[in-house]
Amino acid sequence: MNAEEPRAVAPPLRRRSLMVGAALLCGLAPMQALRAAERLDPDQEALFIPGTARPTADGRLEVDIHAWVYEPERRWGLNAAFARYLGLNLKKLSPAARLRFNQRTALFHAESEEGKVFELDFDGSAARVATPPSGADGRMNMRIVIDVPRLSPSSEWLKFHAVTGPGELLHRFRGEALIVPAQGLSVISDIDDTIKRTQVRDRREMLLNTFARRFEAAPGMAAYYRALAKAPDTRFHYLSASPIQLYRALADFLRDADFPLGSMHLRESTTWRTLIPGEQDSRTHKLGVIERLLADFPQRRFMLVGDSGESDPEIYGQVARAHPGRIDSIAIRDVTGEDGRAKRYAAAFEGVAPGLWQILSPERPPAPIQLAR
C-alpha cells in the first residue's frame, strides 16, 4: 500500500487503488468493500484508540491505526435501561454520580456504523491515506507505512486526523500513535486494580467504581511509573479487558493521575452482553496483545505489571516461560492478601527465575527494582 499519497485530492483511479489496498490489508474482498463504502454522515463519529508506530529498516514508520465508527444514540430512557441491566439503581446515586454514569455509559448506546471510509492526514507530513471500510462492528484496523514526518527529535507521538468530507474538512477527528524505538524498555501494564482501584472481585463495587465514582489511582503507582519513564526510550502500553467504550474516561484518568501516557489496548465490546468478560476472554485478549507487542518489537526489553485479582500472574508467567530473555521484570500488585510464598505464585511462576518477579504492596508505594540487562 502506498502511504505517500500527496495532500492534494488524488485522481479517482489512484484513490480507488488506495482503497482496494486497504481493503486487502484488512482481509476484505475489495470489490465488496468498494460497493459498501460511504463517507461519514454529519451525525456519525470516529474514535481513535492510540496504537504504536515503529521504525522500519528503510527509515520509515509502520503505523497501527485503530478506529471505531459509530453514531451516538441520545434516546430518552437508554441510561435507565442500561443501569437496570447492570443491576444499579440510579435513584440511589448522588447527582454527581448520576452525571458521571451518564457520561461514562454514553458510548454503550452508540450504534456501530459499517462500510464507512475517510482519509487520514498526518501532522508534519504530506501523506494522505485512505482507510478501508469499517466492519459490521464499526471497527477499522489497518497497518500502514509512511515517510517519517517532520517531528522534533524528542517527540514520542505521531498525530493525525481524519478528513471525512470531499474537498474540505467536514469532520476532524484526531488520533495518535506512540512512536516506539527499536530498542529500550516497554512497560506493559494492566489497569484495573493495578494502577486504578476497581475491586474487580466484587461485582457491585466494580460497577460503581467503573461507572459512578471518581477513578482513584492505586497508591504510589503513578510515581513508580514516572520513575521508570526517566530511562531513555522507555514506553508504556496499557492493556486491559475494559471495553473500548471506556477509552475516553480511562485516558482522562491517566492524564489526571499523572501516569506516563502510552498506547492503549482495550477489549473489543460493542454489545451489552460482552460488557463484562469471562476469565478466558480476558486471558485471550491479554495474551494476544502481549504476543503482538513482543513480535512487533523484537529488540526491546519488556516489563509486565499486573495485579493478583484475576489471572495476571498466570498470564505473565506463561509469557516469561515462552519468551526466555525477553522479559526483564514482572511486578504483581497484591489485592488478595497473598505474599510471595503463596502456592499460587509458585505455580504461576514455575520455571521463572525468582529474581524476575516481585509482589507489590497494595498500600505502600512500590520500591524501585533493578531491571535485568
Image (spheres, helix red, strand yellow):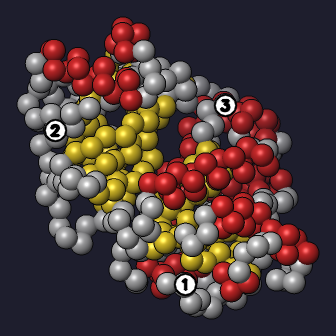
Q: Quadrant of residue 140?
A: top left
Q: Given contact means CB atoms under 8 Å apart, are the residues at marks 2 and 1 in contact?
A: no
Q: Is residue 148 above or below residue 217?
A: above
Q: Sequence order check: which comes first, mark 3 or mark 2?
A: 2
Label 1 neighbourhood size at 10 Å, few (<14), some (14-19), many (20+)? some
Q: Nearer the viewer, residue 54 or 262?
A: 54
* Residue, disc 3: 271
Q: Looking at the image, is mark 2 or mark 1 nearer the viewer?
A: 1
187 displayed left or right of 64 = right
Q: Residue at x 83, y 54 (%)?
A: 204
* Residue, disc 1: 372
Q: Secondary structure at mark 1?
A: loop
* Residue, disc 2: 4
Q: Is residue 249 above or below residue 119?
A: below
Q: Secondary structure at mark 3?
A: loop
Q: Sequence order check: which comes first, mark 2 or mark 1?
A: 2
